[in-house]
Amino acid sequence: MRILLLTYELPPVGGGGGRIAQDIAEKLAQRGHEIVIITSHLRGLPKEEYLDGGIKVIRVPSLRREAFRAGFLTMGAYIFSGFWDGLRLINIWRPEAIHVHFAVPTGVLAWALSRLKNIPYLLTAHLGDVPGGAPEKTGKWFRWVFPFTKPIWQDASKVVAVSEFTRQLALKHYPVEIDVIHNGIDIKENDPGEIKLQSPPRITFAGRLMKQKNPLEIIKTLARLKDLPWDCVLLGDGPLREDVENEIAHHNLQDRFILPGWITPEEVIENFGKSDILFMPSLSEGLPVVGVQALAMGLAMVVSNIGGFMDLVKEGENGFLIDNRDDYEKHLRYLLTNPEKLRSYREASRTHAEVFSLEEIVSEYESCLEGFL
């Protein structure tokens, strides 16, 4: 089957949504499907290249300057450039289906190409695609664009959401049939082997340093745990980088934090292999890919009780879902002072990761796409 994949973010550009889009595409290619991806260009990256399985990647001009940040201008440029490149590709290659990640902005491109060329599209919706899903990130945008997003959902041949939370929120705004297909991970490739605790215990955060991810709460919480041995790695970059560094200095914790900046998905997994606890006090999340990756790598979870995190945590078995910010300190202290419990939580995460096996998830996507034929 010939499948055109549209995603405005693809590694090394963007976050977890682009990573899962690439993973799904590579698995579909392994099953014999032909895949072409149209995504955003970033200076220093090739405009065309081939991924595993012969997947062709076309990076169109988007005016994007940073891997971790996109704005209205860059999104608009991607839609404009992607439309013309998409038209040329469709006329020559004639894809049988379009798979689009992100209703905004990529869904606009999928909708336009679908209407013009009568090609069905499958929409994978992430939390930021839904009004109210990430208000601190997209709230202002939806005040202007919401009326224009309805056709994207209504005209899709199939809509899936990455978590039940995202699905329920979407249904409040878009009365269409929506199924859930979780983000997944290759369990065999991401195997930590025997669970071994780090000394001192290592706490890890992975994501953009932005308001939605609430990174300053990490430092404030760990400052109250100075009496215990630990170190912390903050994987990622973003507009709050300077604020994070200042907060660390304010508490005189420079020797206990590591900030490697924006790193590759492979380096994220490598860091998870040297960590014990995923600490994510996010204000909003769909189903974070880093959360699924952390499960597979056997990390205990201390995360906010929101969105897709609820799918990842079995309370009191592999981690804790936190409602009250003071409970971050309480539960981290419990894990840091009980090594056997920490080990059992980590082993439980690895077991729970089987639910998010990428092979099964790709089979669900394959069934959806082949249903268009």
Image (cartoon, rainbow, N blue to C red):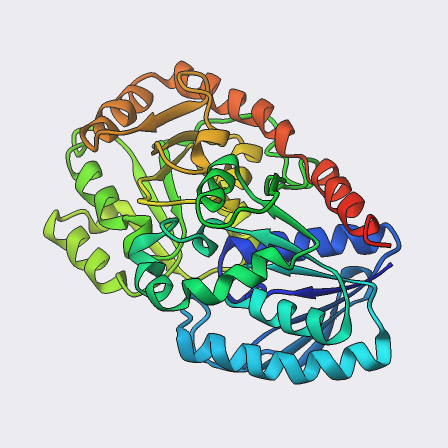
Residue 74 shows up from this direction: yes
Which quadrant does the C terminus fall into? bottom right
Residue at 59 percent of width and 30 percent of height: 353
* Rendering coords of residue 66 (x, y %): 42, 74
Asked whether, in this view, residue 310 is left or right of residue 162, the answer is left
Residue at 72 percent of width and 76 percent of height: 116
Q: Please give the count of numbered marks on the rendered protein.
A: 0
Is 148 placed above or below 139 here? Answer: below
* Rendering coords of residue 44 (x, y %): 55, 81
* Rendering coords of residue 354 (x, y %): 64, 28
Which quadrant does the N terminus fall into? bottom right
- The residue lying toward the viewer, choosing from 169 and 333, is 169
Residue at 44 percent of width and 43 percent of height: 172
- The residue lying toward the viewer, choosing from 148 and 26, is 148
Residue at 57 percent of width and 45 percent of height: 161
* Rendering coords of residue 75 (x, y %): 48, 74
Which quarter of the figure has residue 256?
Answer: top left
Which quarter of the figure has residue 97?
Answer: bottom right
